[in-house]
Amino acid sequence: TAFKGDGQTSRRGTLRAKMSAVIKAVDKNGNLRIEGTREVEVNNEKQMTTLSGLVRPEDITAGNIVFSYNIADARINYKGKGTLNAANKAGFLSRIFNFIF
């Protein structure tokens, strides 16, 4: 039996947004646990961004801004729902055939 194959994948993206977050807890050392959600709907397309992580008080600017690169254990999730998102999914029969074969 012989097998020869190769593959390639590539992904590129940029997410640029400003959003608000709230302090959910203060750790013993004074670091702040934050969480925030932002939902935007345009033409029946919902886009939801969620953010959570840990911020040191000294990383908060005078304008009450924290840059994402200053958020430890950052979890940034960006999801979309709507017509465009549905068009990117394989149909029901395609998923069944892909599962079988």
Image (cartoon, helix red, strand yellow):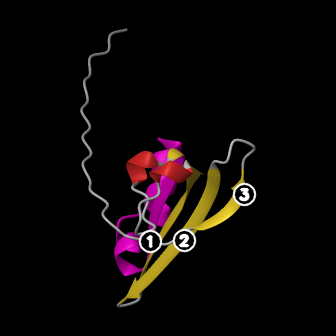
For residue 25, which numbered disc appears in the image? 3
Question: Which one is in front in this view, the residue at disc 1 or the one at disc 2?
Answer: 1
Disc 1 marks which residue?
A: 19
Residue 96, image x and y in percent? Answer: 52, 54
Q: 55 or 12, which lies in front?
A: 55
User: Which residue is at the far right?
Assistant: 28
Residue ID at (24%, 40%): 10
Which segment is the magenta one? 73-101
Disc 3 element: strand
User: Which residue is at the far front?
Assistant: 62
Q: 49 or 27, which lies in front?
A: 27
Disc 3 from disc 1: Cα separation: 19 Å
Question: Which one is in front in this view, the residue at disc 3 or the one at disc 1?
Answer: 3
Residue ID at (39%, 56%): 67
For residue 7, which numbered disc appears in the image? none
Verify whether residue 75 appears in magenta: yes
For residue 37, which numbered disc appears in the image? 2
Amino acid type, mark 3: Ala
Label located before the other in sequence (3 or 2):
3
- Residue 45, image quadrant: bottom left
Q: Are marks 1 and 2 in contact (CB under 8 Å)?
A: yes
| Structural crowding at the residue carrying mark 3, measured as other residues with C-alpha within 10 Å and reported as few (<14), some (14–19) or many (≥20) | few
| Structural crowding at the residue carrying mark 2, measured as other residues with C-alpha within 10 Å and reported as few (<14), some (14–19) or many (≥20) | some
